[in-house]
Image (spheres, helix red, strand yellow):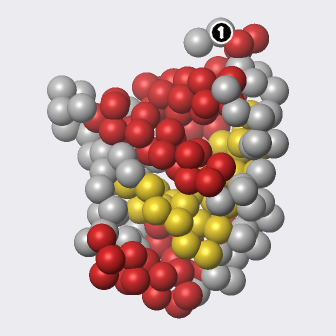
Amino acid sequence: MEKKQLDTRIRLINDDITKLKVDAIVNAANNSLLGGGGVDGAIHKAGGRQILDECVEIRSRQGGCKTGEAVITSGGKLPAKFVIHTVGPVWQGGNNGEEELLAGCYINSLKLAVKNNVRTIAFPNISTGVYKFPKRPAAEIALREVNKFLSSNDTLEEVIFVCFDMENFSIYSEMLL
């Protein structure tokens, strides 16, 4: 992906996603929606019981969240108004639809954001932690899908990629800056 093709509304930071004052943050959730490790655990911890209670309601209605799909809750005690929970794929070598499922995480999160009048949204590095998706291809998919979505949507004012670790930050920096 050539840098000059990227939408100017895309931004990169190295920070803690739970501290951002944006309309929505995206949670790299698991299918149960009941919290876990990494960014999921941090969001549930910082956001408080309200997020978990809303996730339990969603589970009661639809039985969790499928890989590549997304659901939305309030932000609880977070500075963000909403949390969009999306379930990334576990890397199994790349022959089990992982790339399409990861693309779905970004597309479905963005569609849900627009549906809920979100103007600013922040994404973590979905599936690159315990789910072991290779970081460089994951960044390429993320940037490609967000850029493609923004090319046909003017509702979103800013999309922030929030890298907690320096390896992801360096990869995204090469592609963005």
Q: Is residue 169 left or right of residue 60?
A: right
Which quadrant does the N terminus fall into?
A: top right
Q: Is residue 21 above or below residue 126?
A: below
Q: Amino acid at mark 1?
A: Glu
Rendered view: 13 above or below 57: above
Residue under the image location 64 percent in, 68 percent down: 82
How many numbered tags mark residues here?
1
Residue 148 rendering spot, x and y as whole percentages: 60, 24
Viewer-proximal residue among 136 and 22: 22
Q: Residue furthest front?
A: 115
Residue 142 in the image, given as x and y percentages of width and height: 53, 33
**Which residue has dot 1 on it?**
2
Secondary structure of the residue carrying numbered label 1: loop
* Quarter holding residue 118: bottom right
Q: State left or right for residue 2 relative to residue 129.
A: right
Residue 100 locus on image (x, y percent): 34, 31
Instruction: Judge whether 128 appears above or below 61 on screen.
Output: above
Mark 1, Cα crowd under 10 Å, few <14 / some 14-19 / many 20+, is few
Q: Quadrant of the C terminus?
A: top right
- Which residue shows up at 61% across the image and 75% down it? 74
Q: Residue at x 53, y 66 (%)?
A: 72
- Estimate the x, y position of residue 107 in percent, counting from the top left: 50, 39
129 or 59, which lies in front? Answer: 59
Observer able to see residue 32: no
